[in-house]
């Protein structure tokens, strides 16, 4: 580019004019930017001023809330420096009970100290300031007497000394609060605790006295029950021999002696009923207090054999000779083979050595009673532990029966034992091997009544006995066929059993047999419900017969 003096004057003027215009535009732009920046700074200053005002207002509100909270919870604060002295929060005056508007000072704190605490607090505060190193915090409790109303209040102090540094001199911080209500509450709680502890000791003493009284009562009841059991055994044992002997004589007495035998039998029955009432009424009181025998798991439930033996092999455990003779004769008449022993220990040894289809066990015997012998047999290994056991007891109470069943007996008979009851118990035990009174037998009562009512009176008893024997026989064949898996034998026995059962309205047997036959092909059925239905039916037949069938000579 040429130098400016080499350019014509007109051209120089144009160039300078352009430069001047650019400078003016730049200046205007700078002024505009500066004005805009000044406006932004002004607005920023306004916002900052507003924020400072809002912050100050919030601080005032929070300070007011804090002071209000301190006043509400009856709490105050203290701050102190060596050069500046001590200053209290506004709530301190009301806390210490000063008149409204009066300022709180250290001297006034000392003035309101309770006389009983004054010396101690002055001594401890002197030690705090004179002996303890900075950084230590101490707790104090003392009483004051408020000047405004003369009321005694308890205060709690927490005082900490902070060591000074370059940023801040050494200073003291303290909080004080009113704990009068807290102490009163603590005393109330402690008083309640003491009363509760005293009550617990009294209850423990009463429980010990009750336990001792209960022990005395149980001992007395135990002695009383033992006496009643012994008396029942002493009375019913000869009654068993008398009743059984009269039944055995029935087949041997000639026509001219039948009436005399009937009179003797009636007298024996009346004597038995009177003895039963006396024993049961004597045992009624306190019977519920008797604890059930034993504890823990029940003994194993005996399972029946697959079929019913033609001549059941029976063990009889009875310590009275006359009763052994009577029961042996009754069992022979029922088609059983019999082995006799005189006590429970001998019964256990016999079951351990030899197989029996059934055990008839007297309850009260020497050496080992029937209950103990039953438990021992149930504890044996192998098939012997599952042998059905029929207990014979002098008691006819339900609680006695339940106790004996819980010990492992299959069924219980009360003395004197009748032939019909013994026969039913044997059939039931051989069929089910368990207590079936808990299983409700299902009968068509109208059909049962018509079946026997349509027969001549002389044939009704025979029909009942025949039905029981047929049900026992065919049920045994069904069980044997199930055990052997013989389908043809099962069908024959099931058909015969269904016919006999329907004749007397024993619908429970028919229903359970049908359910078993329905599930049998799919291996979904159990034979146990059928077994229990048969046993329950056999137990129920005699009761239904007595209740529904008219008695005609």
Image (cartoon, rainbow, N blue to C red):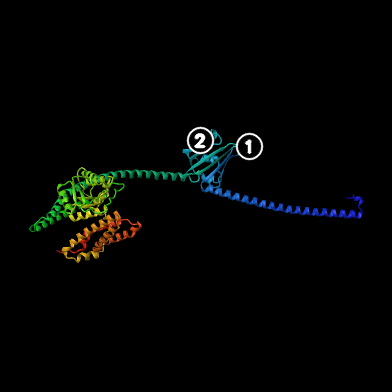
Residue 73, position as x, y percentages in the image: 51, 47
Q: Nearer the viewer, residue 285 or 255?
A: 255
Identify the residue shown where x is 78% and y is 54%. Answer: 29
Q: Nearer the viewer, residue 247 or 132?
A: 247
Task: Mark 1 or mark 2: name the one nearer the start of the chain.
Answer: 2
Identify the residue shown where x is 88% and y is 55%. Answer: 14
Judge whether 165 appears above or below 46 on screen: above
Q: Nearer the viewer, residue 206 or 408?
A: 408
Residue 462: quadrant of the picture: bottom left
Residue identifier under label 1: 166
Q: Quadrant of the C terminus?
A: bottom left
Question: Residue 68 shows which numbered tag?
Answer: none
Nearer the viewer's eye, disc 1 or disc 2? 1
Residue identifier under label 2: 124
142 relative position to 6: left or right: left
Q: Residues within 10 Å of mark 1 (few under 14, many from 20)?
A: few
Residue found at the very far left of the displayed protein: 256
Residue 238, position as x, y percentages in the image: 15, 50
Residue 481, position as x, y percentages in the image: 28, 56
Visible residue check, residue 434: no
Residue 173, position as x, y percentages in the image: 56, 40
Query: Which type of secondary structure does the marked residue at label 2 adopt?
Result: helix
Determine contact: label 1, label 2, CB under 8 Å.
Answer: no
Query: Which type of secondary structure does the marked residue at label 1 adopt?
Result: loop
Q: Could you give the CA–CA distance between mark 1 and mark 2, rounded to whole angstroms? A: 30 Å
Q: In the rendered picture of this protein, how many numbered marks are placed on residues? A: 2
Identify the residue shown where x is 10% and y is 58%. Answer: 258
Visible residue check, residue 350: yes
Q: Residues within 10 Å of mark 2 (few under 14, many from 20)?
A: few
């Amino acid at each position: 580019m040429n130098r400016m003096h080499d350019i014509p004057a007109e051209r120089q003027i144009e160039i300078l004019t352009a430069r001047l215009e650019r400078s003016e535009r730049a200046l205007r732009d700078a002024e505009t930017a500066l004005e805009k920046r000044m406006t932004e700074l002004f607005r920023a200053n306004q916002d900052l001023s507003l924020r400072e005002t809002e912050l100050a207002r919030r601080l005032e509100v929070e300070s007011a809330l804090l002071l209000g909270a301190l006043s509400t919870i009856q709490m105050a604060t203290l701050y102190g420096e060596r050069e500046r002295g001590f200053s209290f929060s506004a709530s301190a005056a009301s806390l210490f009970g000063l008149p409204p508007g009066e300022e709180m000072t250290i001297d006034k704190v000392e003035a309101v100290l309770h006389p009983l605490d004054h010396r101690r607090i002055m001594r401890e505060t002197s030690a705090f300031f004179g002996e303890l190193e900075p950084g230590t915090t101490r707790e104090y409790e003392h009483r004051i007497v408020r000047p405004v109303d003369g009321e005694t209040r308890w205060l709690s102090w927490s005082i900490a000394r902070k060591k000074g540094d370059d940023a801040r001199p050494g200073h003291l911080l303290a909080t004080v609060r009113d704990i009068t209500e807290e102490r009163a509450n603590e005393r109330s709680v402690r008083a309640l605790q003491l009363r509760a502890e005293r009550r617990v000791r009294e209850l423990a003493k009463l429980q010990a006295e009750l336990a001792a009284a209960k022990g005395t009562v149980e001992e007395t009841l135990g002695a009383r029950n033992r006496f009643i059991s012994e008396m029942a055994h002493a009375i019913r044992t000869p009654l068993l021999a008398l009743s059984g002997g009269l039944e055995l004589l029935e087949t041997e007495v000639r026509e001219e002696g039948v009436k005399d035998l009937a009179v003797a039998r009636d007298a024996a029955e009346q004597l038995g009923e009177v003895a039963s009432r006396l024993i049961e009424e004597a045992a009624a009181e306190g019977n519920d207090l008797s604890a059930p025998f034993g504890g823990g798991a029940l003994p194993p439930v005996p399972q029946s054999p697959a079929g019913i033996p033609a001549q059941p092999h029976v063990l009889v455990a009875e310590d009275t000779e006359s009763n052994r003779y009577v029961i042996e004769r009754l069992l022979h008449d029922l088609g059983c083979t019999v082995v006799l022993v005189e006590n429970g220990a001998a019964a256990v040894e016999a079951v351990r050595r030899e197989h029996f289809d059934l055990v008839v066990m007297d309850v009260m015997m020497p050496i080992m009673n029937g209950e103990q012998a039953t438990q021992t047999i149930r504890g044996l290994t192998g098939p012997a532990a599952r042998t059905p056991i029929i207990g014979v007891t002098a008691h006819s109470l339900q609680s006695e029966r339940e106790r004996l069943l819980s010990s492992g007996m299959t069924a219980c008979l009360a003395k004197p034992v009748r032939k019909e009851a013994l026969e039913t118990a044997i059939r039931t035990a051989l069929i089910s091997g368990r207590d079936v009174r808990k299983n409700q037998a299902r009968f068509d009562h109208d059909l049962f009544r018509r079946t026997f009512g349509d027969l001549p009176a002389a044939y009704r008893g025979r029909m009942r006995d025949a039905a029981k024997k047929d049900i026992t026989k065919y049920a045994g064949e069904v069980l044997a066929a199930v055990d052997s898996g013989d389908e043809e034998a099962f069908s024959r026995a099931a058909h015969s059993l269904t016919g006999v059962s329907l004749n007397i309205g024993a619908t429970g047997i028919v229903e359970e047999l049908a359910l078993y036959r329905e599930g049998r092909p799919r291996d979904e059925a159990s034979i146990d419900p059928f077994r229990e239905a048969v046993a329950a039916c056999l137990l129920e037949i005699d009761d239904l017969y007595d209740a529904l069938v008219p008695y005609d000579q």
